[in-house]
Each structure stands twice: as C-alpha cells, then as structure tokens.
Amino acid sequence: MVREPDIHICEVAARDGLQNLDVFVPTEAKCALIDAIAAAGVREIDAGSFVPPKVVPQFADVDVVMAHALSHQDKRIGALVPNFKGAERAIAAGVNSIYFVISASETHNRANVRRTVDEQVEAFRAVRAAIDARPAAERPQLMGAISTSFGCSLEGDISEAAVCNLARRFAEAGADEIGLADTVGYATPTLVRQIVSAVRCEVGPDVTLRLHLHDTLGAGLANAVAGLEAGIRRFDAAVSGLGGCPFAPGARGNIVTEDLVFMLERMGLSTGIDLDRLMQTREILARHIAAKHLTGHLHEAGIPKVLRRAA
Amino acid sequence: MVREPDIHICEVAARDGLQNLDVFVPTEAKCALIDAIAAAGVREIDAGSFVPPKVVPQFADVDVVMAHALSHQDKRIGALVPNFKGAERAIAAGVNSIYFVISASETHNRANVRRTVDEQVEAFRAVRAAIDARPAAERPQLMGAISTSFGCSLEGDISEAAVCNLARRFAEAGADEIGLADTVGYATPTLVRQIVSAVRCEVGPDVTLRLHLHDTLGAGLANAVAGLEAGIRRFDAAVSGLGGCPFAPGARGNIVTEDLVFMLERMGLSTGIDLDRLMQTREILARHIAAKHLTGHLHEAGIPKVLRRAA
C-alpha cells in the first residue's frame, strides 16, 4: 500500500498559472505540462477554468485539455468555475473537483465574476444541487474558494468577519472543502494563522481547509509554514511560480511548487513528488512563456546535491 | 524618548552584499549607500570587512568607507574580520562592533579563513584580550559569528553539536553576542527552530543571539519567522537581496531588507525603518551593480498602497 504523503499539493500552473498570460499556450503544450506534472507524482492537478473564452481566451481549449487531463485516472483533476454555467460544463466534462470561487471582497467579486457575493452564494447552492442530482459515482468534489481572504488590491485589508461569514455560508451550502486564497499575495504569517484559526472555529473540525498562496511580497513560503502550523495540509502551488489574477491588479505568481516541495521535504514532510521530474516542467514552459514570468529559487540555485534526501 | 523598535535589523548590503561581486563599487557609492541606509532609520550598519585586498579586492577602501560610516554617530557601525590582524585594524578604525567569523564546517572554515576551527577560536580569544586591554569607552562590541550554522555547500548537513560546541566556545571566550549564519541558505524553518533552541540552551539566556539568513532556496523569510518564533529579535538583511560568500559555492543573496521590513511591520512588529526611504537605495545600487544581482519582491510589485500602515 502506498502511504499518503504528509502534505497534499495541488498543482495550479495549468490554470491559475496561465490565466494571466498575454500569450496563448498551445493545447499540446498545456497537455504536455499536465503530463509532466502527473509524472512527477502530483496527485491533484488544476487543469483549467470553464470560463467564457471572451473573458479569458487562454481557456478556449479547456474541453480538450480537460479530457486529456482526465486520462490520468489516478489523479484528482480539477477545474475552476466562476458561475453555474461553468459548473455545468465542468460536470459534463467529468472533472473530479470543482473549485467555485467567491471573493471576500465585494469589489473584487464584482470585478472577477460580475456578480454580488449574495448572487454568487446563490449560484453555489445551485451548483451543489446540480451535483447532488447526479448518481453518486459521478459527483465531483465541490470546493468553495474564498478569493482575497488575506487582503485585496482594490479594497485593502479584508476583515476576518467577511472571510468567516463566507466560509460559513460555503459550509452551510454543502462545500466539501473550503479554500482560503491569498489572491493578490498580501498575507503575512500572523494573518494566515489568524484567518485559518478563525475559519476553523467558524466551520468546525470536519471541513477540509486548503491554502492558496501568491508570492507577491516575498512572504509566500513563510505564509505556507504559518498555514502548516495552523493545521493546513493542502496547498495550491504552481511550477515556476506562474500565476496571477486578470481581475486583481498587482497580483503576482503563486508560490513556487519546486521551492515548496524542497522546503517541506527538507523539513521532514513527505509530498509524494519527485523534485527532479517536477523541475523538468520548466523546459515545457520556457518554450512558450517569456522568461520574466518563470521564477523559482531552486531553478536559479540548482538542487543542492549535498542535501538530497534519500528517495 | 524614542521607543526601541521590536525588531533590530542590521543592514549588511555594504559588506556581505558587496563581497561577492565581480565589479568594484566606487568608494563614493559605498558611502552614499551607507548614508541612504542610515537615513532610512536603520540602527546598525555593517560597513565592510577588514580583509587583505588581495583576498577580497572590494574592501581595498575599507578604511575610508569605515571612517565615513562612523561619521553617523547615532548608528552602530560594524565590520567583519576573519582574523586577529583584521580585528586590530577594526579596533584602530574605531568601529562599534566587530563580527569575528568562524565556520561550524571545518571545510568551509579552511576555505574561508585558511585556518582550522581550533586556530580560529584561539584568534578570537586574542581579539577579546586586545579589546579588553582598551579603555572601557573605546571597546567595540564583539560578536562571534558562526558560518554554515544550517548547512554547508561543501560538507552538506552540519550537526547541531558542531554549532552548539562553537557557540559554547564563543560564549566561554567572552562573545558579547553570537550570530547564527545561514551562509549558503540551506536552512528550513524546522532547522532554524531546532538550532536556535539548542544554542539558546547551550549558552544560556544572557547571550544575545542574531540570525543571518540567505535566501538561496526561497525559504528566507520563512526562516526569519521561525527565528522570530524561537525568540530571535536581531536579524541581518541586505537591501535588494545582495550578498553571497566568495568561499561558499552556491551561496546566494541575503534576505531582502525591504521585504523583511514590510512583512514584519504588517505583522505588527516595528523596525524603526522608513520603507520608502529604504527603497531609494535601489537607485544607488543600480548605477553600479548588474540588474541580475538586484532582487526583492517589493521592488518588483511596488509597495501596496492600500495596505500602508500609519507612520
């Protein structure tokens, strides 16, 4: 029996990582990226967004990419959706996880999905009902993702109450999991501890929590460690630190999966991910994406061979 | 009365930050950098190394730079020294602090200062005696700095015992302060907590400890937060993330002062540093140092105005 890793990492480069780029990454390259991520041992892969191509042209090919991703039957393949229609498409595509996004910032929520938070919570309830109407074997997991949980580049600081209220509404509406997203990268370790603990109290011990961090201001991995200390075991991250939100000015890339994996493994926490293989995703990305978008300390410094952990 | 800041930051860009560069930064630029750092409110400035110019040509002008730095009479001006001769020069120059460096890695110690650890501890004792022979008002503070406290690119992992032994020898020989240096940037938050706690037990509660971190693998600020949690209140950092060790292959820049200050202040911890002014050091550096050496998330993303703390 394969032991579950201590830390569960969801690789979001093929979704969050691509959504803010000004170049269209060819369908084959997206599929090759997903294959490389899968080959590295990542268990959950966010493979695209079901959004109108007019809004985010990068995902015009999401149906093809998603079908390819789902050929990795041992992986949990997820999609972000901004509304009921996107969820319908995701369900029809047969995804394993749907990430339904609502922002704790009313202003960002309107910019991001063109609806009020209340309207968006209604849509989430409808998605829950649509999933529950399916045969049990065909129901994807439903995550409620709370954007701007740690600050918003439009509104500034976001209150703990706003995040907790939304978490409670997600939980009451039947979210299988709740994601706390630092959409613009304004979190600090103190704030992560505060918000994670408050949300945990609000929703109780049975709801799985996940942390989605961007590294806008340099504290990305510090925030991940703070989340770890607050009990989080699921993290989103993107290879080469890709990422950003088209509707959140100032947002930078996600925390770098390679750097996160190296740090966690050196801390004695298993991730189930083969770092050498994960590093190979860089080649695929470098063929299509400008160097300025590709970050990562480990790529710069190389994997320190003297410190390699036994496999 | 001016309140002491919660966190004491020593700016090392003018020493550690320059020692690994392949260009000579003109004396006036070094002095301008130190002036800008002082104007930003930094209370301790590492202004150079008293090393033979043949070994590190960057510090051929250290006497002139140090005299200029010492004109900031309200600051603590320090110098790194690798041996007794360097310490004699530093004492003669009238520095406020001497950082005497010994490596926990025997291999790195030989590469760095061309002596065994035992010989280096003897030299430290001689420096202590030389300082104590001065009139009380003219005695600089003496810090024992332990290089490669969290790993070595030549030896790999460094044992807790090696770091603790050296810390004890420093304390017994009369160090006013002990610095734990992640010379090559191999620390993790777990390791920082472990080593800081072990050294604290070894030397007792009365010796001030300081953390010197490099951000080789992306965990720099995470390591700083771990240090904070383990009781550390003094940190070295370099503006624009400059730094590296000429005799430690693979070492990258120090943690970025701007990013550290922003994170700490947003965590509610005062540093006494004016971030806008600190950011202005970038202009001085950019005139003389290649862009690839200048890092920092805050410089890339800008200071998020929506989050500014009241002054």
Image: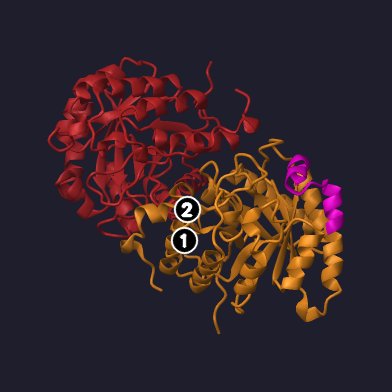
Chain colours: A red, B orange
Q: Residue at x 30, y 45 (%)?
A: A146
Crowd tier of the residue under label 2, counting other residues whose Cα lies within 10 Å: few below 14, some 14–19, many 20 or above: many
Left or right of residue A108: residue B51: right
Q: Magenta stretch mostly in which secondary structure?
A: helix
- Residue designated by label 1: B267
Labels 2 & 1 near each other (Cβ < 8 A) = yes
Left or right, B128 with reference to B223: right
Residue picked out by circle 2: A189
On whether residue B111 falls in the magenta region, the answer is yes
Image point 86% across, 49% down: which residue? Answer: B118
In the picture provided, is B219 more to the left or to the right than A29?
Answer: right
Label 2, label 1: how many angstroms apart (C-alpha)? Answer: 7 Å
Camera-side residue: A177 or B150? B150
Amino acid on which the number 2 mark rests in the picture: Pro
A241 or B206: nearer the eye?
A241
Name the chain letter of the residue that bears numbered label 1: B
Taking the image as shown, residue A179 lies to the left or right of residue B285, namely: left
Marks 2 & 1 on one chain: no
| Label 1, residues with CA under 10 Å away: few <14, some 14-19, many ≥20 | some
Disc number placed over residue A223 in the picture, else none: none
Mark 1 residue type: Met
Part of the protein shown in magenta: B104-123
Q: In which quarter of the image is residue A10?
A: top left
Magenta segment includes B131: no
Q: Whole-percent x and y of residue A118? A: 18, 49
Residue B251 place in picture, x, y as percent: 60, 43
